[in-house]
Image: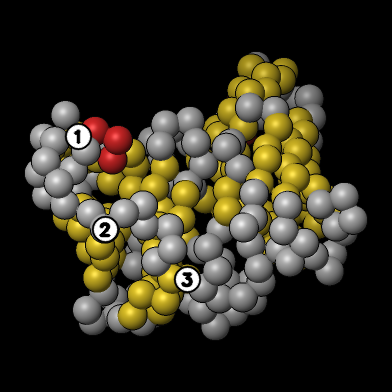
Amino acid sequence: GENVEQHPSTLSVQEGDSAVIKCTYSDSASNYFPWYKQELGKRPQLIIDIRSNVGEKKDQRIAVTLNKTAKHFSLHITETQPEDSAVYFCAASRLQAGTALIFGKGTTLSVSS
Amino acid sequence: GAGVSQTPSNKVTEKGKYVELRCDPISGHTALYWYRQSLGQGPEFLIYFQGTGAADDSGLPNDRFFAVRPEGSVSTLKIQRTERGDSAVYLCASSLRSSMPDTQYFGPGTRLTVL
């Protein structure tokens, strides 16, 4: 089955810096890669996702890149703000309804002002 | 509109007891998922419902865990003879199942503590 590895487990940056979180996956059949943000005690919320037919996707300060050959994908946050502080989870699945998301272990991002 | 809701938000029980956790999906979402999130980990898949039927229960850890969705909306996760290792946050998610990608929207979770 699918296995998702996520690094780093913790990341501390200064406000305004960029943050990069990397994930690798094992199942070449996976073709959908969402990223969720989870604030302390809150529900995971989808912030961006990418399909395998696209190499990069951007939404304001957030971007995701995908390298299908190497089976890895990354989340990039630019101009970080204190409110970006949270746990970020990457996930992988197949692009079809009813497929379970396989999550990484999460990255705790701390943005200090 | 209203998001996925879960009740109770917290549940404390004693080892060996039976518990029920409830999930109300987003109205109109036919797909419903249960995940379990242990401290410091990502959510782990338990079971998926399409309508009233469990289409994939491969993530249920053992036969003490069972889930139902009798009318295709609300779902209940049932845990018998609870063990301390069952302590975790139980998350429910729902999706429309008619769009690609089939975005899963999560509820706030039920934090289960087994003493």
Disc 2 to disc 1: CB gap under 8 Å:
no
- Residue shown at 66% from the left, 68% from the top: A94
Q: Is residue B69 above or below residue A101?
A: below
Q: Position of residue A105 (x, y in %)?
A: 57, 37
Dot 3 falls on which chain?
B
Give the residue type that dot 1 points to: Val
Q: Tell me which numbered mark, 3 or 1, is placed earlier along the sequence.
A: 3
Asked if one can make out residue B111 in the rendered structure from this viewpoint, the answer is: no
Give the mark, 2 or 1, whose residue is nearer the N terminus: 2
Q: Quadrant of the C terminus of chain B?
A: top left
Badge 1 density bin: few <14, some 14–19, many ≥20, Cα 10 Å: some
Residues tagged by mark 2 and mark 3 found on one chain of the structure: yes
Q: CA distance from mark 2 to mark 3?
A: 26 Å
- Separation of disc 2 and disc 1 at Cα? 18 Å
Instruction: Tell which residue pokes out farthest to the front in this image.
Output: B63
Q: Earlier in the sequence, mark 2 or mark 3?
A: 2
Q: Amino acid at mark 2?
A: Asp
For label 1, the residue is: B114
Q: Residue at position x 78%, y 25% from top?
A: A17
Please tell me whether mark 3 sits on a helix, a strand or a loop: strand
Q: Chain of mark 2?
A: B
Q: Which residue is mark 3?
A: B95
The image quarter containing residue A51 is bottom right
Q: Nearer the viewer, mark 3 or mark 1?
A: 1
Q: Is B66 or B93 nearer to us in this picture?
A: B66
Judge whether A86 appears above or below A46 on screen. above
Chain under disc 1: B
| Secondary structure state at the residue bearing disc 1 | strand
Residue under the point 72% across and 58% down:
A27
Classify mark 2: helix, strand or loop: loop
Rendered location of residue B95, percent (x, y): 47, 71
Q: What residue is disc 2 on? A: B63
